[in-house]
Amino acid sequence: MSDAFTIGQLARAAGVHVETVRYYQRRGLLREPPRPINGIRRYRRADADRIRFIKRAQHSGLALKEIRTLLGLSGRLACRATRHVAATKLEEIEARLRMLRRLRRELRAWVAACDANTRDACPALEKLAV
């Protein structure tokens, strides 16, 4: 594999669309190489690796702002900062899970109220109207 990719080749190597590459550039997550005289920018293998890192981090639930922080880290001391990002994200997910459990209980109650309803009015809609 060559180490001089066009943007299309970079996108294919990283498993994303060209617009994703451009988006990451606009967000400051990926460098935009200078345009040489012939007009075709060339990317490095490291750029494809960086895009794959970003995608894996996104699939782990991290936001681009958090990923930008991780991209700036390296070495053994990076572990503390990485742990902080992961712990913060875990707290957010735990809070979201609590909210989803509460919502599930509420929706189950609505379904049960509707299933048991013998009146002309809908009890779930009445609860929303209050």
Image: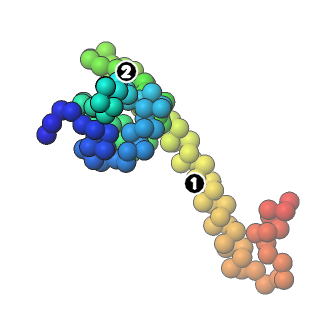
Q: Which mark is residue 72?
A: 2
Q: Is residue 76 above or below residue 95?
A: above
Q: Residue 129: horizontal and vertical position, in percent?
A: 84, 62
- Judge from the rendering whether residue 65 lies leftward or rightward of residue 82; answer left or right: right
Residue 113 lies left or right of residue 4; in this view the side is right
Q: Going 43% across and 32% down the picture, which residue do you hit? A: 25
Estimate how packed mark 2 is, as few (under 14), some (14 to 19) or many (20 or more) residues with alpha carbons within 10 Å: few
Left or right of 112 on screen, residue 79: left
The residue drawn where x is 29% and y is 30% is 38
Residue 94: horizontal and vertical position, in percent?
51, 42
Kind of element beneath mark 1:
helix
Residue 83 seen in this snapshot: no
> Helix, strand, or loop for circle 2?
loop
Is residue 11 something that shows in the picture?
Answer: yes
Q: What amino acid is labelled 1 in the image?
A: Arg
Name which of mark 2 and mark 1 comes first in the sequence: 2
Based on the displayed image, in which of its 4 quarters is residue 116 positioned? Answer: bottom right
The quarter of the picture where residue 34 lies is top left
Give the percent coordinates (x, y) of residue 98: 57, 47
Residue 51 placement, left or right of 20: left
Quadrant of the snapshot with the C terminus: bottom right
Mark 1 = which residue? 101
Q: Residue pushed farthest top?
A: 77
Q: Amino acid at mark 2?
A: Gly
Q: Residue at x 79, y 62 (%)?
A: 128
* The N terminus - image quarter: top left
In front: 72, or 106? 72
Q: Nearer the viewer, residue 45 or 84?
A: 45
